[in-house]
Each structure stands twice: as structure tokens, then as C-alpha cells.
Amino acid sequence: MPTGDVPLLERLAQLPAVPVSDVQALLEALERPNLDPILGPLFGTDDDGEPTVNPLVPAVLQLFQSREHLTCYAALLEGLTGIWNAAVRAAVVARLRAAGLPQDDLLLKLQALSPTLGFASENDRESAREWLADPFTQDALLVQQCIVRLLLALRGMAEARAQTLTQASEG
């Protein structure tokens, strides 16, 4: 099968593992991250022309640093999974509400339908309360965090692939 026919995630999985710790070094090496086509939207300038960064970027980088063995590919999959779960949860909740399910029964029904849609573990009780209070904001924040994770991981993998391609063309 030609490379172009292999699904993207399979091609990415075949790349050498890139530690997420490499993403921090990549960001530091970028002279003007706001001009990077992938990461640029995460950076900007304030009204005074001073550089700014999306507040989720430091939070995601801190998460990356706390997970020593995490690879960019695994972070990419985690980001996609979080976005997928939020999308499915939104669709299911819309259907349950349209069917007249009371707010108090939402989490119970979500947990019964799928453990990834509800908040099944004991540690998730506070998250469940926050989510029930404002599901839109909670899932929107999750999706934004997952997009930042996905973009950082994808850019880290792309940098490693670029290095491999340019070394191969030099040799």
C-alpha cells in the first residue's frame, strides 16, 4: 500500500517516539512563535504590542513536564480522545434533554451509556458537579485544552519528521 493510502494516525504511529519534553525546547527555539502556521494562533500581542500566549499553553506544557514518559503521539491521541468524548457527550446530552430527561438524571444516564461519557471514578465527583452546573463551559474548556495539546504534540512530531527528512536529503 502506498504511503499516501495509510491512514494518518498509522503513519504517525510509525514515526520514532518524540518525548513531549521536546516541545518546550521547540517553543524556546522559535524566534517568532506567532508566525508558526500551527502554533501561531496560540500566540499574539496585547494592546501595547507586547507578546502574549494563550493561558492554556503554560498549563499544557506543565502537564507535559509532569508526565515524564509521555510521547507526542500519546498526547495527540489524548487530545483527540478528549475532543471526541466532549463531542459525543454534547450529542447525547442534547438528545436526552430533547427526550425530557431531568437534569438530575443526566450523569447517571451518561454513565450507564458509556464510562467515557460520564464521570465514573471517585476522583471525578467534583468534576461532575462542575460539569452539571455548566456543561457547555466545562466541555468547551476541555476541548480548548485538548486542541492546545493536539497542536503542541503535532508540531513536536512534525519537527522530528522534518529533521529526519532534511538529514536524509543531506546524506
Image (spheres, rainbow, N blue to C red):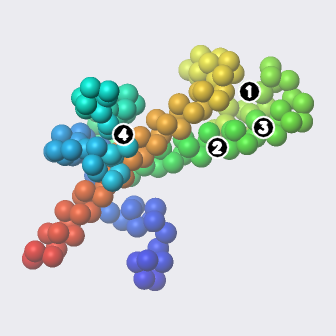
Residue placed under numbered mark 3 in the picture: 94
Please provide percent x and percent y for residue 31: 16, 44
Q: Nearer the viewer, mark 3 or mark 1?
A: 3
Q: Secondary structure at mark 1?
A: helix
Q: Residues within 10 Å of mark 4 (few under 14, many from 20)?
A: some
Q: Indicate the amino acid at tag 3.
A: Ala
Residue placed under numbered mark 1 in the picture: 107
Residue placed under numbered mark 4 in the picture: 42
Q: Are marks 4 and 1 in contact (CB under 8 Å)?
A: no
Q: CA distance from mark 3 to mark 1?
A: 13 Å
Q: Are marks 3 and 1 in contact (CB under 8 Å)?
A: no
Q: Nearer the viewer, mark 4 or mark 2?
A: 4
- In the image, taking residue 13 as reference, residue 143 lies left or right, namely right
Q: Secondary structure at mark 4?
A: helix
Residue at image x 32%, y 38%?
43
The quadrant in which the C terminus is found is bottom left
Q: Nearer the viewer, mark 4 or mark 3?
A: 4
Residue placed under numbered mark 2 in the picture: 87
First along the sequence among labels 4 and 3: 4
First along the sequence among labels 4 and 2: 4
First along the sequence among labels 3 and 1: 3
First along the sequence among labels 4 and 1: 4
First along the sequence among labels 3 and 2: 2
Q: Residues within 10 Å of mark 2 (few under 14, many from 20)?
A: some
Q: CA distance from mark 4 to mark 2?
A: 22 Å
Q: Residues within 10 Å of mark 3 (few under 14, many from 20)?
A: few
Q: Secondary structure at mark 3?
A: helix
First along the sequence among labels 2 and 1: 2
Residue at image x 80%, y 22%?
103
Q: Is residue 31 above or below residue 5?
A: above
Q: Is residue 37 above or below residue 110?
A: below
